[in-house]
Image (cartoon, rainbow, N blue to C red):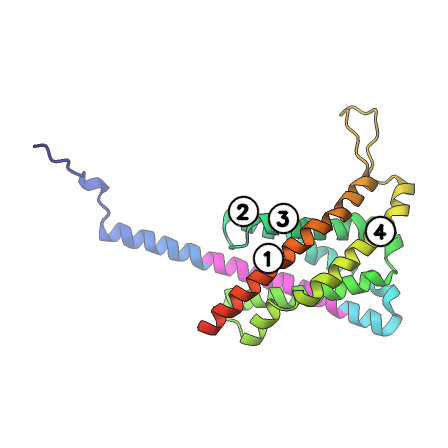
């Protein structure tokens, strides 16, 4: 009878196991440090957006809000591109399938609509949009900043993190759709971001119709996203009760 022997070199020793454990521990610490830094930096960005918006509303009314927040808004929301990467590489548990639509939708709004078409800047939908975004994001980034930095979050912050969307998501969605609809005539007249035939790529693109398509997408995407967030809320609050 032949007995298969495992080469001694392949048997992990206690020192090698300790080394692997130390590496895993270091990786975990680096992950938490990075995510803490990221969340607090973006949190500060959204606090700046919120503060600038409040001052503009009090001093000059909703027509002045966008001009007051533009730079802070572009930074804070564009930084969220990193969250797609975080999801892809497994730094966070958020599924890529829900992260990409949320982030790309926001980027479309700030760069493709607000920044690209000044005609939207003085509309009241800008203010309602930013109020809903600021409440959501200040709460969210504070929640994750505390979780990664200290390993816990207060119960009131947990409740806010998983409850503000109930009001903010509908308000934000109506505001986004409203702004896209308002800008459509200006978009069509300007022909901005359109690629017409003939060209060397033999490809055409009409930003006006692409924006209409994006607006129509809200119909199937919004209910799915809302159900996903409701399920997340039930799971998070139920888990908090048992701990």
- For the point 11% across and 35% down, which residue is it? 3
Whether pointer 3 and pointer 2 mark residues with C-beta atoms closer than 8 Å, the reply is no
- Dot 3 surroundings within 10 Å: few (below 14), some, or many (20 or more)? some
Q: CA distance from mark 4 to mark 2?
A: 33 Å
Closer to viewer: mark 3 or mark 2:
3
Circle nearer the N terminus (3, 2)? 2
- Mark 4 and mark 1: Cα distance apart in space: 26 Å
**Could you tell me if the residues under marks 3 and 4 are in contact, i.e. CB atoms within 8 Å?**
no
Q: In screen coordinates, is 174 left or right of 164?
A: right
Magenta residues (range): 30-51
Mark 4 surroundings: few (<14), some (14-19) or many (≥20) residues within 10 A? some
Question: In 3D space, how far apart are the residues under numbered discs 1 and 3 (Cα atoms)?
Answer: 14 Å
Q: Are marks 1 and 3 in contact (CB under 8 Å)?
A: no
Image coordinates for residue 181, horizontal then vertical, percent: 84, 51
> In what element is the residue under mark 4?
helix
x, y percentage for residue 236?
52, 66
Q: Give me the disc on residue 100.
A: 3
Query: Residue tagged by mark 1?
Result: 228
| Residue 5, horizontal then vertical, whole percent | 15, 37
Q: Quadrant of the C terminus?
A: bottom left
Badge number at residue 88: 2
Taking 16 as reference, is 162 left or right?
right
Camera-nearest label, 2 or 1: 1
Q: Earlier in the sequence, mark 4 or mark 1?
A: 4
Q: Which mark is residue 181?
A: 4
Q: Name the mark nearer the viewer: 4 or 1.
A: 1
Q: Which residue is located at x 57 percent, y 48 percent?
A: 96
- Within the image, what quadrant is residue 38 found in? bottom right
């Amino acid at each position: 009878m032949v007995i298969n022997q495992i080469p001694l070199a392949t048997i992990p020793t206690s020192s090698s196991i300790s080394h692997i454990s130390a590496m895993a521990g270091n990786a975990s610490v680096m992950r938490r440090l990075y995510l803490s830094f990221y969340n607090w930096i973006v949190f500060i960005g959204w606090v700046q957006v919120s503060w600038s918006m409040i001052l503009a509303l009090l001093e000059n009314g909703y027509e002045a809000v966008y001009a007051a927040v533009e730079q802070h808004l572009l930074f804070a929301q564009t930084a969220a591109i990193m969250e797609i990467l975080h999801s892809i590489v497994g730094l966070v548990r958020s599924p890529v399938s829900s992260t990409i639509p949320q982030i790309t939708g926001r980027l479309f709004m700030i760069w493709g609509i607000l920044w690209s078409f000044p005609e939207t800047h003085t509309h009241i939908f800008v203010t309602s949009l930013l109020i809903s975004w600021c409440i959501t994001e200040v709460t969210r980034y504070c929640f994750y900043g505390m979780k990664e930095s200290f390993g816990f979050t207060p119960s009131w912050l947990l409740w806010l993190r998983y409850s503000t969307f109930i009001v903010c998501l509908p308000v934000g969605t109506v505001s986004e759709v409203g702004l896209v609809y308002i800008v459509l005539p200006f978009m069509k007249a300007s022909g901005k971001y359109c690629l017409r035939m003939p060209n060397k790529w033999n490809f055409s693109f009409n930003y006006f119709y692409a924006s209409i398509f994006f607006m129509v997408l809200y119909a199937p995407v919004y209910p799915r996203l809302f159900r996903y967030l409701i399920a997340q809320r039930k799971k998070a609050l139920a888990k908090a009760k048992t701990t």
